[in-house]
Image (cartoon, helix red, strand yellow):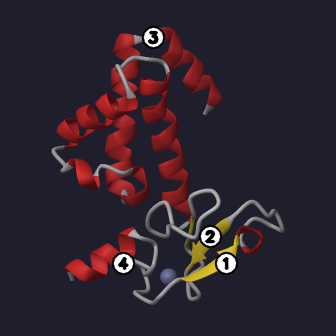
Amino acid sequence: MEKELHLINKGLQCPYCHCATELKDSATVYKGRHYGMVRVCPQCGAYVNCYPGTDRATGSVADAELRRLRHSAHLWFDAIWQNKLKRSRYNAYSWLSLRLRLNKDFTHIGMADKELCRRIIDISRRYISTHDPDLYRRLEEKI
Ligand SMILES: [Zn+2]
């Protein structure tokens, strides 16, 4: 089970179908746009991007809803450290892992499931709305 979780978090195994994923050019899932590699489940089509210029997945493969939630979680959480509401990216992640009561090694949006994404979005939105209402309004308009 622990080995399976490890494979899932590296994008090597599909958490929905439990089969091995395949390494493909991004063009296979992004309508012909080439910009890197993705890992794709051959059964359900869940996918995840790889880090630029590598064949290492940024997390587990995800279905459309989870990809949307991860995108939103990144938007809200990244805004905190990008706008210096926390001293650094590292500090922001430490703060988030405490708020989530989750080990820092597992505080990665790329590994997050839908429930965890919703918690990250909620925590980040509240923090921004309290500490920088103007930024909060700008982000609300963007989404
Ligand atoms: Zn699958």
Residue 131 image point, x, y percent: 36, 12
Q: Earlier in the sequence, mark 1 or mark 3?
A: 1
Within the image, what quadrant is residue 18 found in?
bottom left
Q: Quadrant of the N terminus?
A: bottom left
**Mark 3 or mark 2: which is in front?**
2
Specify the amino acid type for callout 2. Answer: Val
Residue 42 coordinates in the image, percent (x, y): 59, 87
Q: Residue 112 sits in which quadrant?
A: bottom left
User: Disc 1, disc 3: CB below 8 Å?
Assistant: no
Asked if the residue at tag 2 contacts the one at tag 3, i.e. Cβ–Cβ closer than 8 Å, the answer is no
The span from disc 4 to disc 3 (Cα, nearest Å) is 40 Å
* Residue identified by numbered label 2: 38
- Up-down relation of residue 92 to residue 57 (above or below): above
Which residue is label 1 attached to? Answer: 24
Which is nearer the N-term, disc 3 or disc 2?
2
Q: Earlier in the sequence, mark 2 or mark 4?
A: 4
* Residue on which the image places disc 3: 133
Query: Does residue 23 appear in the picture of this structure?
Result: yes
Name the residue at 34% across, 13% down. Answer: 130
Secondary structure of the residue carrying tag 3 is: helix
The kind of residue tagged 4 is Leu
Disc 1 to disc 3, C-alpha distance: 42 Å
Q: Kindly indicate whether the residue at mark 1 contacts the one at mark 2 (C-beta within 8 angstroms).
A: yes
Whole-percent x, y for residue 9 in the image: 37, 68
Query: Going by the picture, which residue comes out furthest to the front?
Result: 53
**Residue drawn where x is 33% and y is 30% of the image:** 92
The residue that label 4 is drawn on is: 7
